[in-house]
Amino acid sequence: MKRIAEKFRLDGGAVSVKPLGEGFINDTFVVVTDKGTRYILQRKNHNVFPDVPAMMKNIEAVTSHIKSKAKDPDRETLTVVLALDGKLYHKDEQGGFWAVCTFIEGTKTFDKAETPELARQGGIGIGRFQALLSDFHTPLAETIKGFHNIRWRFTQWDEALKRNAAGRADGLKEEIDFVESRRAEMLDFWKKVEDGIIPTRVTHNDTKLSNILFDSKTGNVLCAIDLDTVMSSTALNDVGDAIRSYANRTAEDDPDFSKVGLDLDMYRAYMEGYLSEMGPNLCASEKEYLAFAPLYITYEQVLRFLMDYIDGDTYYKIKYPDHNLVRTRSQIALLKSMEENYDRMKETVASLL
Ligand code: GN1
Ligand code: MG
């Protein structure tokens, strides 16, 4: 691991490399050099990101844009550290892709939005990220094909059902019926994006609270991190994915479905923070569908977890054999709660706008 770290332009030799966090996708480590400087080293998941160089180019372009506007460019976004050969990544002998960025000191993250104030701050984080990039017009690579494109997800879904690779589909009638019952509604929404009625912008695409960095001294939002999925999509997807995590009363994989549900106070707080930064940039069609966005993304998450379960757990890391099924059911419970609260969500958005 130290040898890998030293393939990058660090400020000294690597003295320790330790694992950090437990993301589903990449393997993440903290490197400390003999100067005491810390860096983040990641093995990028080549299965999930087939074109790591293109992904790193996206990250470099977006962070440079943010830096050009920042008061403190080293802290207000990520800083990619180049490899010794000047590339944005290092490819090891096994074909693994590695990337390094600086460790932003004096910061903290939160795993769960415990208070509406924290949710409001998270909304500011993503709203500001989108607003800073609202004048970024360089095309970005689509690093995960059709990531939040439900039409593409249905193509994958139909194939997964046909393959029935793990032989699990027969026992899943209720869950599969749930997905099918909302197919047309979700495609109707996505058609608005395809037709350009809802515009596309630079989006973060993984907007959970733990991807927002806070300054530990001031407590203020510093920046959005984990930029692997930065792509062009509708801004609504970022909002939807955030609400899916912030405003759920429990974890996305809580097996006690009675605990699952949309917390309207958290919803309001997040939307307030988000709109305080991004509201002035949104057009009428974006505003119109803001309240629907969490339903869309939660639905997509149901489909993705269930599809992975049907495929035999090839995409998401699992902690126990039925983990993806539990995730599916837990997210179905959340979606049902959002559907029940949809009118109130619309009223909240209207009052904030
Ligand atoms: C994955 O590993 P993490 O937490 O960054 C996934 C998201 C899902 C999330 C579900 C690239 O993100 O889309 O919403 O798990 N990221 C990718 O917990 O697929
Ligand atoms: Mg992520």
Image (cartoon, grey):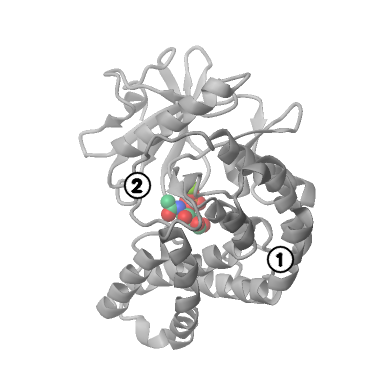
SS assignment at label 1: helix
Q: Residue at x 43, y 84 (%)?
A: 172
- Is there CB contact under 8 Å for labels 2 and 1? no
- Nearer-the-camera pick, 228 or 349: 349
- Nearer-the-camera pick, 250 or 347: 347
| Residue 183 image-quadrant placement | bottom left
Q: Residue at x 68, y 71 (%)?
A: 342
Q: Residues within 10 Å of mark 2 (few under 14, many from 20)?
A: some
- Nearer-the-camera pick, 83 or 280: 280
Q: Residue at x 60, y 45 (%)?
A: 210
Q: Amino acid at mark 2?
A: Glu
Residue 256 in sight in this render: no
> What number is the disc on residue 204?
none
Label 1 within 8 A of ligand 1 by Cβ: no
Residue 300 picture location, percent across and down = 48, 66
| Residue 80 image-quadrant placement | top left
Residue 296 picture location, percent across and down = 53, 66
Residue 243 picture location, percent across and down = 64, 58
Check the picture and name the quadrant holding the N terminus.
top left
Residue 286 in sight in this render: yes
Q: Earlier in the sequence, mark 2 or mark 1?
A: 2
Residue 232 picture location, percent across and down = 43, 46
Q: Residues within 10 Å of mark 1 (few under 14, many from 20)?
A: some
Q: Which residue is mark 1?
A: 346
Q: Which residue is mark 2?
A: 142
Q: Is residue 55 left or right of residue 250?
A: left
